[in-house]
Structure formats: C-alpha cells, structure tokens
Amino acid sequence: MNTAAFWKATAERVVRTFAQALLAVLGAGSFGILDAPWTAALSTAGLAAVLALLTAVATSGGAEGPGVLETVRRRE
C-alpha cells in the first residue's frame, strides 16, 4: 500500500468504477442528456468510487496491488 504502483492502480480502478457506475445509472433509464438525473447519477457513481477505494485499501495487506488476488508488477 506504500508504493506508487499501488496508488496508480488504485486510482485507475476508482476512475474506471466511477465511469462504469455513471454510465450504468444514466443508461438504465435511457434518459436524454438534458433529462438525465445528474445529481443521483453522480452521487451513485461517487459512492461506487469511494467503495472501490475502500476495497483497495482494505485488501492491500497481502499483495502489492489493490485487489485481493492482484499483484502490481514493477518496471525495472
């Protein structure tokens, strides 16, 4: 958890999770861009991103990566 590789992989996972959740909420109702419930969608995506971050930190005890079975490879 104290490596730059861990935080880089975690940041990528958080951004990816945010985008996926946002698209899922907006796409589920097939809203037009002006009619979309942006507050609810951004709130849901933000919560998903926070949960992704907390999951990465909570599972960082064993491996070097942010996942339970994931290892971040260092470039040498």
Image: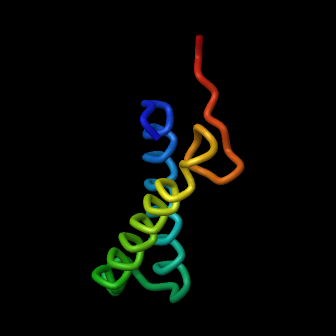
Q: Is residue 15 left or right of residue 27?
A: left
The quadrant in which residue 51 appears is bottom left
Residue farthest to the front?
61
Choose between 25 and 72: the one closer to the eye: 72
What's the residue at 67%, 45% (across, down)? Answer: 70
> Which percent across, then down, holds residue 57?
47, 54
Residue closest to the far left: 39
Looking at the image, which is closer to me, 27 or 62?
62
Residue 18 position by quadrant: bottom left
Q: How many marks?
A: 0
Looking at this rendering, what residue extends furthest in the top direction?
A: 76
The correct choice, above or below, for 55 with respect to 63 in the image is below
* Residue depicted at x 52% and y 85%: 30
> Residue at position x 48%, y 80% from top?
25
Is residue 42 left or right of 55 when viewed as pictured? Answer: left
Q: Quadrant of the C terminus?
A: top right
Question: How far across and down, in percent of the image, does residue 13 sit?
Answer: 51, 52
Specify how the rendered protein is coloured.
rainbow
At x 43% / y 46%, what residue is drawn? 11
Q: Position of residue 26 (x, y in %)?
A: 46, 79
Q: Nearer the viewer, residue 46 or 69?
A: 69
